[in-house]
Image: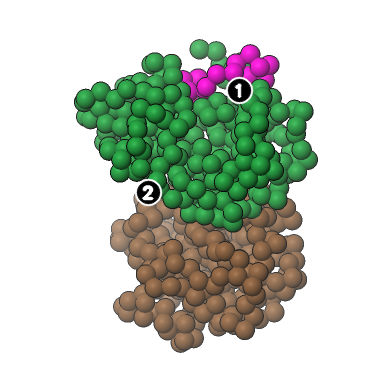
Chain colours: A green, B brown
């Protein structure tokens, strides 16, 4: 595989526009939420009150598009995400490949942990990930679990789901619990109905994946949760990564493990 | 020992006004910072950028003095801290036993983790804590380590120091690293000069403690750090616990361990 800097250059040049699951596997991947400064406190409060879906990695000063914390070179948040989503007043209005033309001086960028970060560790442990093997985006669902509100931000928790052979479940919990900054241990194991998922074959985001007779679905808190919570309050503008199209940093996954 | 609810009632009635080290030992203890809402975002940003000195436990909605998250009954932050400090424009103006008369509708309360939380675990492991055995407050020092600034908040990192027999040091690191929400592992072990502490016999806060020939001083990030950082920007009002006089919650320490 090409190295992560080469991959970033391709993303910056809009030559890589796919979901990042399976790419940059030994590096921290991040959810991106960009909001005007006036929403930043409530968003931060929401994140701290809901640490499983919203593990905060970095917050920029207002107006600065540059991120140095998790990279050897400087990440430019306006260009270094494979695909963005632009929401106005709660509605998706565009899915651009960069946001140079719409950058604002009052934008604050939040990086939040992503479960793609621990997928490499699962693979290193000999635990297969079906969605990667099938070259799909991970399946994501809106649950009936309420988040803890903050200001006007509130909503249901979103989860990502991965099916595993029943014999692997304890080890999957062990491994992922070592990465609290990447959503950590699962929030649910087994019956999707328990957390309000009516049809496991129809994810709300990402691609469906089949679950074999001897497999169990495992659910992790997902970084799409804060996007949904913010959209419920219809801010005049919010920019995020497109689901599954994460920011890939240079930060080694191993350094995040506890 | 009396139970933690009885102790809280004594604190509420201003009958217990001492440092809390050695009390409520199996329960989460917390640093308290109370600021007007307009400072809350920068304080939160500062805390997230400096997680070792500022592990955030809870943030209240503006104006609410009640905390439910870590207690069976409801904590009233205006009365349930043994002793407070009131700062105006960066100057200490009062050390009251409650703050009922000066409570404001725009006050936001931050609870931050405290190293007293892991002291019980050290004792359970047969590791003696000299300052508790000598009925002293822990020794705290301002170092030469810069914090990561946020808004107008900046300053040097404050540490707490505990001396241990050299043979115990690795185990002390192991145990405390399991409590990231109580400052976690030490930030320095050994020579105080390396982190800018000129005179180990003269702490900036708390009580001095002697270090024997076969003992090594171990330093942890301290929750007084954010107080110092905020005071550097001279807010019109800030209220904190008096150093060492922490909020004792009902939350079992064991539930915090990772």
Residue B53 visible in the current orientation:
no
SS class of the residue under badge 2? loop
Name the disc covering residue B232, or none: none
Q: Residue at x 55, y 26 (%)?
A: A245
Graded by Cα atoms within 10 Å as few (under 14), some (14 to 19) or many (20 or more), the crowding at tag 2 reads few
What residue does disc 2 label?
Answer: B258
Is residue B25 shown left or right of residue A107? left
**Camera sees residue B123:** yes
Q: How far from the left and from the top, in percent, is residue B25?
A: 37, 68
Pick the front one: A133 or B218:
A133
A214 and A93: which is toward the camera:
A93
Which of the 4 quarters of the picture holds residue A168?
top left
Q: Is residue B130 above or below residue B122?
A: below
- Residue at coordinates 62% horizontally, 33% vertically from top-left? A92
Near mark 1 (Cα within 10 A), the count class, few <14, some 14-19 or many ≥20, is: many
Q: Which residue is mark 1?
A: A82
**Magenta stretch in the rendered image:** A11-26
State the separation of the CA atoms marked 1 and 2: 35 Å
Residue located at (50% from left, 12% from top) = A1
Residue at 52% across / 22% down in the picture? A19
């Amino acid at each position: 595989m090409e190295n992560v800097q080469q991959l970033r250059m391709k993303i910056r040049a809009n030559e890589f526009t796919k979901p990042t699951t399976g790419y940059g596997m030994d590096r921290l991947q991040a959810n991106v939420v960009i909001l005007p400064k006036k929403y930043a406190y409530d968003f931060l409060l929401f994140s701290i009150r809901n640490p499983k879906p919203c593990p905060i990695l970095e917050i920029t000063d207002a107006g600065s598009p540059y991120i140095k914390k998790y990279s050897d070179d400087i990440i430019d948040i306006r260009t270094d995400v494979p695909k963005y989503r632009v929401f106005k007043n709660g509605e998706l209005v565009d899915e651009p490949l960069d946001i140079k033309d719409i950058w604002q001086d009052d934008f604050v960028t939040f990086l939040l942990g992503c479960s793609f970060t621990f997928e490499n560790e699962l693979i290193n442990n000999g635990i297969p990930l079906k969605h990667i093997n099938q070259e799909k985006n991970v399946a994501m669902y809106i649950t009936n679990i309420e988040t803890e509100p903050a200001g006007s931000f509130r909503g249901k928790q979103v989860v990502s789901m991965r099916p595993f052979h029943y014999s692997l479940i304890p080890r999957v919990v062990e491994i992922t619990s070592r990465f609290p900054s990447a959503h950590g241990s699962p929030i649910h194991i087994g019956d999707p109905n328990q957390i309000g998922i009516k049809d496991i074959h129809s994810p709300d985001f990402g691609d469906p994946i089949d679950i074999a007779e001897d497999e169990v679905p495992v659910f992790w808190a997902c970084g799409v949760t804060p996007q949904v919570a913010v959209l419920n309050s219809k801010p005049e503008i919010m920019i995020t990564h497109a689901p599954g199209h994460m920011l890939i940093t240079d930060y080694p996954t191993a350094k995040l493990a506890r």
